[in-house]
Image (cartoon, coloured by chain):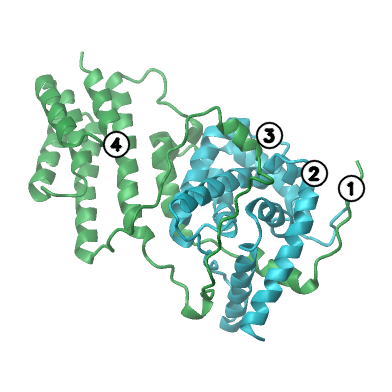
Amino acid sequence: MRVRAANPLVVAAAEERILGSAEATGGLRDLFRGHAGYVWNTLRRLGVPPADLEDLTHDVFLRVHRHLAQYDPTRAVRPWLFGFAFRVASQYRRRAYRRHEVFGEPEAAAHAGTTPEEQMAAAEDRALVLEALQAIELGRRAVFVLYEIDGATMKDIGDSLGIPVNTAYSRLRVARTEFTDAVRKLRSGRGPR
Amino acid sequence: MRVPVLPPLDPELVALIAAEREAAAPGPALDRVWSRVARSVGPVADAEDPSSALSHAAPRGLTAAARNLAVATFVAGGVTGAVIHAMWVRRPVALPEAHRPPSVAPVVPVQSSAEPPTPEVDRVEAKVPPPRTHVPVGPPPAPTPSAASSLAAERAILDRARASLASNDGKRALALTEDHARRYPLGLLGEEREAIAIQALVLEGRYDEARARAARFEARSPNSLFHPAVEATLESIP
């Protein structure tokens, strides 16, 4: 297995695996306190518009509540939560499609940067990432987000999405190409910063 | 198993992704979500002991009246949360204009039939009833300051009525619901008021009045979310 030593999230994921167990058994409140922001941002990355983020975050945690007893404490909690968020976002997307509504791109989240200029630059970067993510089919985007943003292992990604690890790899490869192309295209449309 | 090797991402993309990784979620919005979640999973979720949030039902040994009160409180809180949320959710996100992403052509949803994602939770959730969903409807009108303050005032009266019920003071709860009806005959929380009033009547032993009021409630609001609570209240009549 390839070791992603350069990614600091590997360490965080290992810690989270331990933390996740305590939080899951500690109750929904602690789970929410520790990971609601993560769920919120995951839904954003999966394309949920800002106006519906509160509703869908609520839905995710209701589902989590119903299935809390099924949480396997040997697994990292965030990929497990991601599975719920992915399911909710997929259903939302299908409903929006049936209603012929525009499934708009999500708005960039707030960020506590240092200077206003840095905050603005970071916000622009996040907006660009979110727009580029929209170019990736949802199933592949899920793998991309889990791997590149969340730093999840391929094993956890496979478990979370119910797919073989090799499928996750192939989805990631395609998603990377799509993401790279989308960023290039968006940047050329915007001109130099 | 032979593990595929992935080339490293372009450092520029890595930097972009790192920026998104640092994104923070809005605290007040999450507070509102937790408030709704706690109401939806039941009153026990707000107890001091976090593990109590895992309880799905009222504890064994409660009286029927107490169970019904729990049901009524739960449903009442949920609807109130939904109303308040509906008023909140349309507020624009307070981001500077310069931070907003430029609009692009709408993204056509891609059907995932070619390679359908089948997360583990799909299989699990096929065994449980479909969850309550929040299908976004048309945008509700933005609340005016007076509407918002009216809602808060309505909420305050009914909170006191519910507290009276909790302390077995049906008379006071009833008086408060009458006060609410007098002040807000077309109020937003009329259905919640009726559910509390019916509960108060039962608590006072005024069973016939409770049944009659429940029948009127059923006729007037056949699709109310409070029906389960009202039915549970009536079932507790000896």
Q: CA distance from mark 4 to mark 3?
A: 35 Å
Name the amino acid, label 1: Val
Q: Which quarter of the figure has residue A83?
A: top right
* Residue drawn at (66%, 43%) of the image: B116
Q: Are marks 1 and 4 in contact (CB under 8 Å)?
A: no
For chain B, give the colour: green
- Which residue sits furthest top? B238
Residue identifier under label 1: B3
Residue identifier under label 2: A165
Q: Which chain is cyan?
A: A
State the SS at label 2: helix
Q: Could you classify mark 4 by the number of other residues whose Cα lies within 10 Å: few (under 14), some (14-19), or many (20 or more)?
A: some
* Residue drawn at (18%, 43%) of the image: B190
State the SS at label 4: loop
Q: Could you classify mark 1 by the number of other residues whose Cα lies within 10 Å: few (under 14), some (14-19), or many (20 or more)?
A: few
**Are dots 2 and 3 on a single chain?**
yes
Name the amino acid, label 4: Leu
- The answer to which of B87 and A6 lies nearer the viewer is B87
Name the amino acid, label 2: Val
The N terminus of chain B - image quarter = top right
Looking at the image, residue B154 sits to the left or right of residue A96; the answer is left
- The answer to which of B129 and A78 lies nearer the viewer is B129
Residue identifier under label 3: A72
- Which residue sits furthest bottom? A192
Residue identifier under label 4: B225
Is any atom of residue A113 visible in this view?
A: no
